Amino acid sequence: MKEFEKFVCPGCSLYCDDIKLIFSDKNELLETYGLCLKGYKKVSELFSQNRIKKPLIRKNGELQEVSYEEAFDRVNELLKSSKKPFLYGFVNTTCEAQIKGIELARKINGYIESNASYCHGQTYLNAIETGFYFTTLTECVNKGDTFIFWGSNAADSHPKFLTKTIFSRGKFRITGREIKTLILVDPRKTATYGAAGVRDLYIPLQPGKDLELIRFIKDFMNGDKSQIPSDGFVGIDKEDLNRLIMNLQDAENGVVLFGQGVINSDPQGAVIRALIELVDLVNKQLKRGRFSIIPMTGHNMNGFVQVALSLVGKTQQIEFSNDNLVDNNENFVSKVKKGDFDLSIIVASDPISNLPVTLSSELSKKPLISVDCFHTPTTRIADVVLPAAISGLEAGGLVYRMENVPMNLQKILEPSEKLLSDEQILQKIISNVEG
Amino acid sequence: MKLLLSTIREFEYDQKSLINELSESELKNKVAVCLIHPETYNKIASRSGVNLKLTTNFGSVVLRPVWDESIPLDMVYVNKSIWSNQVTGVIEGRIQLKNIEVDVEPSEDSVLDISDLLNTLKELKG
């Protein structure tokens, strides 16, 4: 039997480090302790029938199994004939692989962006200009008394988040759940609403009205508006809106946790900026304590932001020419839509399942190299598929938790079929390019 | 019926995780769904079990309806997947995933298989 104590779960960006796994000597999963359903499914991926076990190359229209050597040769051929390659993905992997991705982009005069570019990348782009009050999960546990989930269904996206923060007892919050207020701002009563009690608050915001609500609260707090309309505002009852504002003004240690609902309701990022400004205003007016923000990111999205900032000083729109970073106003979406690339290398991501068909059509037209652990719609239309070990189970490495705390993923099992890690695959491609 | 469409990523319908444990037909049955309030559904279809065709400015898709009383009355929610991608799109370089105007009508058509959707993409290959 093999026991792994304090295993760091790679299931989401919470990276829970209080997990115990027990495997048999034949690597069968015998027991798990502390995993949520999402984490359990992640660990179970080790045994999925959907694993890619051999590299694949498209020959005569069909994907055929080949050796790593033949697949890497084909990748090298494609790269040699490419003048505008781009790399994309890099969220469901380690920082070591992300570093190699940027290194490869530099070597091949390529463009690289992570999935963050149309997700929480906007948060960090705004933060570069405005800054924002950040916090950590430990701070939430020990001091947090008000948790506002704005367009975020934490119970579903980060299942143990509520257990860790709302239902826990901290150093200065030893009474725990009883004195913690949960506020849910969402058009829908999501699974997170199920954790709400009598002291908590549900704000049934009308779809797409986030910006109007934030501006109203700011005006009210600034004294520009003195009254809440008697019939409420953007679908919110007057009393509920009043309670929301009171909670913002009276919290000792509050945190706004926002997710896809905020990011996607305004793709231009205005809601994120308004939310950052609201928290800024609240902090200026609070007589004690503070409010902070945590973006509810996915997997190692923050890792790519950290890596890219440290290597090239920017988080997205990273393009190289002659070993140098070049200015670029195009983002991944606009580049793909225009067909402004001639080859794509997709690492640990499935854009064909995630991007609108107008973009996936463009991706399909050009040679596509996919590095992934599983068969996905993207691997099925790829020209070369390089199978990888699962990060956090068969390959270790650094990741950044949702509040930018670095964590170390462990390699607990040898990958089946001697699969290479994302980092090793990218290093091999770099070595081949260097000749 | 004119509604607003929002994509979500809910674990129960998550293609990324389910693709590793279900067959292609099981995956379609589980993921290619739209969440709709039963009252809204009853205004669109005269009986239960009728597929819905969703049409936006970006495209259309046929999905199996799933009743969910937590969905606002004027909305339909679709989990992000290769099916939802048929009705989302790009405006001014930004991906539109929330609050998209959508026309929802009953449909006798079947939900497309993942292979059908991928074949359309494969045909684009040079």
Image: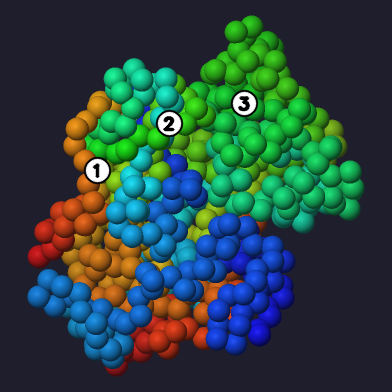
- The residue that appears at 22% across and 31% down in the rendered structure is B107
- Dot 1: what SS? loop
Per the image, the residue denoted by label 3 is: A203
Asked whether, in this view, residue A427 is left or right of residue A254, the answer is left
- The residue that appears at 76% across and 24% down in the rendered structure is A246
Q: Can residue A219 be seen in this view?
A: yes
Asked whether, in this view, residue A267 is left or right of residue A217, the answer is left
Residue A111: x and y, percent? Answer: 33, 66
Image quarter of the N terminus of chain A:
bottom right
Q: In this view, does B62 lie above or below A135?
A: above
- Dot 3: what SS? strand
Asked whether, in this view, residue A224 is left or right of residue A426, the answer is right
Residue with the most extreme top position: A230
Per the image, the residue denoted by label 2 is: B67
Can you tell which of label 3 and label 2 is closer to the viewer? Answer: 2
- The residue that appears at 43% across and 48% down in the rendered structure is B13
Report the coloring of the rendering.
Answer: rainbow
* Mark 1: amino acid: Val
Circles 1 and 2 in contact, beta carbons < 8 Å: no
How far separated are the C-alphas under marks 1 and 3? 35 Å
How far separated are the C-alphas under marks 3 and 2? 23 Å
* Crowding near the residue tagged with mark 2, few <14, some 14–19, many ≥20 C-alpha atoms within 10 Å: some
Q: Disc 1 is attached to a residue of which chain?
A: B
Circles 1 and 3 in contact, beta carbons < 8 Å: no
Q: Disc 2 is attached to a residue of which chain?
A: B
Image quarter of the C terminus of chain A:
bottom left
Closest to the observer, A240 or B52: B52
Per the image, the residue denoted by label 1 is: B111
How far separated are the C-alphas under marks 1 and 2? 17 Å
* Crowding near the residue tagged with mark 1, few <14, some 14–19, many ≥20 C-alpha atoms within 10 Å: some
Residue A336: x and y, percent? Answer: 26, 55
